[in-house]
Image (cartoon, grey):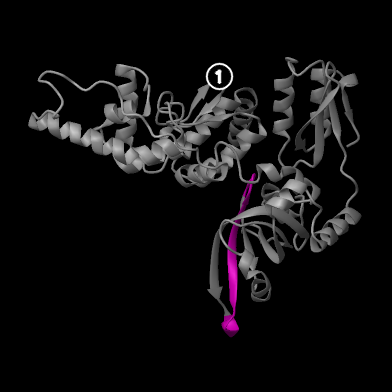
Amino acid sequence: AAAYACVAYQTAYLRCHYPKAFLAALFSSVIDHSGKVAEYAAVCAKLQIRLLPPHVNFAVEKFTVEPDGIRLGMLAIRNMGQGFIRGIVAERAQNGSFESFHSFLKRMQGKDFNRRAAEALIQAGALDGLGANRREMMMALPLFLNGLEDDARRNIEGQIGFFELPGQKQSGEPALPPQAEFSHADLLAGEKETMGFYLSGHPLMRLQNLAQRLGSAKTVDLLDPANETGQGRFGDNEETTLLCVITGAKKKVVKNNQTMAFLTVEDMYGQMEVLVFPGTLERFANLCMEGRTVLLSGRLCLQENKEAKLLCNTLEEVSETMAEQDRLAPHGARKTNAAASAKKPARPGAFLRFASAEDPRLPKARHLLAIFAEGGTTPVRFFYEDEKRYEPQPSAAWNPVLARELCRLLGEENVVSNA
């Protein structure tokens, strides 16, 4: 027990004082498991640590620490072999950074290079900033590869082009036909496909305010293991709502020849399973499909030694109009939220005052709050004295220890809480 306590203390110390290095090591330890990588990416978001794309001019095999954040390792990209990655790093070290998309393809040709790997690099954002957007690179890829293969074949056979003079080489690079960039949704879908998680944003990012107004739960809270002992935010059989994206849908025929659905849903904080029983599926079959953004209402099912599940009662599609106008929840969800409001008192709040947004104490305050972020229900706001402006922060699990440490850091007069 003493040994475990010592390791726990060392781990907590590293996470508190060296969060980037600590998380980079965690990422590298699970680089082959996209689910775990996505989980740690959510932790980075909470700690306001930027995840940088696995760019061919900066990334190596595993995750590394940079002044601006944590750089993803290229092994996190699907269809990327170690040999090809090591070839990229060696070529970069020997001949300098890659200046353009075409020069990258030309320099890497023949070094464990293949078209699938190039497409994965484009979708992951690893070739951004090389003179073309992702759609332009994807459209030009077959043409460029065919041209480079023809050049290589001519070099081997000693042939020259019809308009070339002996001893003369073609100069310049072929131009990329201009194309409008992919939509933001398509860019995110490409990142999800190649890395298993969203890097440059999330489809639900624009719905954050709406989710808050609808009283949507967070998957990270619904999956809290402490629920099994009754200590989590949500209890067994409790009614809740969840604004989410359906990322997987499977149907199964059960007794009486009826069909039920098993959905995998995801929000900005994680993913979980939702069970849709035959009666509910019959009413909402058109919404139980992959890619739909929905507002789920249902009951939480907690069983010992099993992950929490939601038993769905109703679904409603979240449309663009609903997102833009930020309307109130539908009737079923209003009832659920009203019941929750009657059951629980209004949430308390904590306010921390700083001289400005450049206050040197800000990073330390954020680290303290992040340590107590798990299961947090207390809204936290920073107040900047020079701008007279409030800035919302992630909720925290407010307690005497956290309050004492913040008072020690900022002074009692700068910490106000009704928690």
Along the horizontal axis of the image, is 342 left or right of 310?
right
Residue at 47 percent across and 45 percent down: it is 33
Where is residue 296 shown, x and y percent of the image? 71, 59
The verdict on residue 299 being magenta is no
Write the residue at 41% across / 43% down.
78
Q: Is residue 264 magenta?
A: yes
- Asked whether the viewer can see residue 1, the reply is no
Q: Residues within 10 Å of mark 1 (few under 14, many from 20)?
A: few
With 210 as the anchor, is 99 left or right in this view?
Answer: left
Q: Residue furthest bottom?
A: 256
Q: Horizontal and vertical percent for residue 279?
A: 68, 76
Residue 412 shown left or right of residue 367 in the figure: right
Seen at 66% across and 31% down, the residue is 47
Magenta highlight: main SS: strand
Mark 1: secondary structure: loop
Q: Which image quarter holds the N terminus?
A: top right
Residue 300 locus on image (x, y percent): 72, 61
Image point (79%, 60%), residue name? 330
Return the x and y of residue 109 as percentages of the image width and height. 25, 32
The residue at which mark 1 appears reads as 67
The quadrant of the picture occupied by the C terminus is: top right
Residue 389 found in image quarter: top right
Asked if residue 18 is positioned above or below residue 360 in the image, the reply reads below
Tell me where residue 408 sits by quadrant: top right
**The image quarter in which residue 74 lies:** top left
Q: Amino acid at mark 1?
A: Pro
Query: From where the camera sits, is residue 267 visible?
Result: yes
Q: Which residues are magenta?
A: 255-270
